[in-house]
Structure formats: structure tokens, C-alpha cells
């Protein structure tokens, strides 16, 4: 079981897997930063010949690139998807001090679809995972994650368990079974049932029972 410091787990909930974006997401940025540093050191002699402002520019480029790399790694580690045995939690970090958290219980997820499209995603085994929700809203998409097919299989397994638990709960709940049958009836039949239930409640009320005892 994976441990996450900032995940507030519910009763009997445990973390199954923590999913990050594929490293391919940040590799192009790291390559550009490396090229900027190489160019900066290549021009170092020329910049220092320009005097104090050239030295400041040289050091400023280094500080800026290092800061950008640290920010990039920070966001890469903070943007993740936590898979538990009860829900999927999406952590979206957009800055050092701004974060959004969205959670999707398995009871609200209809299905999970993995999409791997293109030569690069096929070779490096990354793609998108689309969560189709039961509510009439757009799907939730997890972009460029590693091994989406494996994650799809894992989530589908918990969706199946959630459906089985839901069906089992309905079978042990007589009120739920009765209400499910009532929903299939016509309006006129529902009104008749309502009147009969109302009459039964009136007969079984404490006042009615007391009156019946007094009559006896």
C-alpha cells in the first residue's frame, strides 16, 4: 500500500496506487533548459567582456533556469492521481500556493476508457484515461499517464466491486426493493398504494391502538 501524507482517507479506505504524468511531459522543457544553459556558458566570455551588466545577465539566466526547473519538478510531483479502493482523487497543482482537488467515487463512475494514439505513446507506453461519469456531465480525462491500460483494468475492477456492493445493499433493503417496484407502476396505481399505506399507518398509530384496547 502506498502512503501519501496529504490524503485524508475515509474509514476502511486505503491507497492502491499513485499515478503521475509520464516523464515525457517535462522532458522537452528540460531539454530546452539544458540548451539555454549551454548557450549561456558558450557566451560567458563575451558577456563578461561587457562589464558588470554582462555578468549580471549571465548569473540571471542561470538563476532563472534553475528556478524554472525546480518549479517544473515541483508541479510534476504535485500533479497526480491517487487511486484508492473507494474513489479516484485528482490533485491539480497550478502554482506554488494554488491547488485544486477533485474526487470521483466509484459509485459515480460509469466506465474507464484508455486511449493510446500515435507512434510516440505506443513506444513509450503512455496515453490518456477517460472516466465516464454517470451524471450528465462531460468525462474526466487524465492526460499523458504511464500505462493507461493497466490503470483502466484496475479502475474497472473496483467499478465492478462497487456495482456488486450496490446490488447487494439493495437486496438486503426491503424498502429499496419496494420502491424499485413502485417506480415501474402507473400513476393511478401509485396513488392507490399511497392511500393504502396511509390507511395502514392510521390503523397502526398509537392512538388507534389505544382506542381498540378501550373498546375491548
Image (cartoon, grey):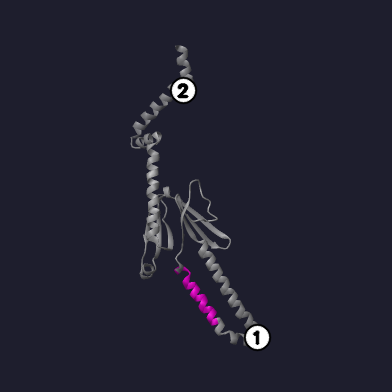
Vertical comparison of 86 with 145: above or below: above
Residue 89: x %, y % from top left: 48, 54
* Residue farthest to the front, as pictured: 1
Count neighbours of disc 1 (C-alpha within 10 A) and say few if under 14, some if 14 to 19, many if 20 or more: few
Q: How many marks?
A: 2
Q: Residue at x 40, y 54 (%)?
A: 155
Vertical comparison of 141 with 66: above or below: above
Count neighbours of disc 2 (C-alpha within 10 A) and say few if under 14, some if 14 to 19, many if 20 or more: few
The kind of secondary structure element at disc 2 is: loop
In magenta stretch: residue 31: yes
In magenta stretch: residue 48: no
In this picture, which residue range is highlighted in magenta? Answer: 24-39
Q: Nearer the viewer, residue 199 or 111?
A: 111
Q: Which mark is residue 51?
A: 1
Q: Residue at x 44, y 69 (%)?
A: 24
Q: Residue at x 46, y 68 (%)?
A: 23
Give the mark nearest the N terminus, 2 or 1.
1
Main SS of the magenta segment?
helix
Residue 17: x %, y % from top left: 45, 56
Which residue is tagged 2?
A: 205
Relative side of 45 to 13, left or right: right
Q: Nearer the viewer, residue 215 or 8?
A: 8
Q: Nearer the viewer, residue 112 or 208?
A: 112
Vertical comparison of 62 with 177: above or below: below
Residue 197: x %, y % from top left: 40, 27
The kind of secondary structure element at disc 1 is: loop
Residue 72: x %, y % from top left: 53, 68
Quadrant position of residue 64: bottom right
C-alpha separation, residue under disc 2 versus residue under disc 1: 97 Å
Amino acid at each position: 500500500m502506498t502512503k501519501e501524507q496529504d490524503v485524508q482517507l475515509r474509514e476502511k479506505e486505503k491507497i492502491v496506487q499513485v499515478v503521475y504524468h509520464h516523464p515525457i511531459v517535462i522532458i522537452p522543457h528540460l531539454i530546452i533548459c539544458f540548451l539555454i544553459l549551454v548557450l549561456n556558458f558558450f557566451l560567458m566570455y563575451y558577456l563578461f567582456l561587457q562589464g558588470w551588466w554582462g555578468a549580471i545577465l549571465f548569473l540571471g539566466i542561470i538563476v532563472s533556469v534553475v528556478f524554472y526547473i525546480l518549479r517544473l519538478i515541483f508541479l510534476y510531483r504535485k500533479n497526480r492521481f491517487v487511486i484508492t479502493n473507494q474513489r479516484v482523487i485528482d490533485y491539480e497543482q497550478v502554482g506554488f500556493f494554488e491547488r485544486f482537488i477533485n474526487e470521483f467515487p466509484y459509485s459515480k463512475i460509469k466506465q474507464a476508457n484508455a486511449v493510446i494514439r500515435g507512434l510516440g505513446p505506443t513506444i513509450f507506453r503512455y496515453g490518456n484515461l477517460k472516466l465516464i461519469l454517470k451524471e450528465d456531465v462531460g468525462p474526466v480525462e487524465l492526460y499523458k499517464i504511464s500505462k493507461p491500460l493497466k490503470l483502466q483494468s484496475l479502475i474497472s475492477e473496483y467499478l465492478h466491486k462497487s456495482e456488486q456492493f450496490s446490488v447487494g445493499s439493495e437486496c438486503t433493503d426491503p424498502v429499496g426493493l419496494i420502491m424499485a417496484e413502485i417506480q415501474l407502476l402507473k400513476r393511478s396505481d401509485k396513488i392507490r398504494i399511497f392511500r393504502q399505506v396511509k390507511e395502514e399507518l392510521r390503523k397502526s398509530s398509537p392512538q388507534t391502538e389505544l382506542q381498540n384496547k378501550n373498546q375491548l
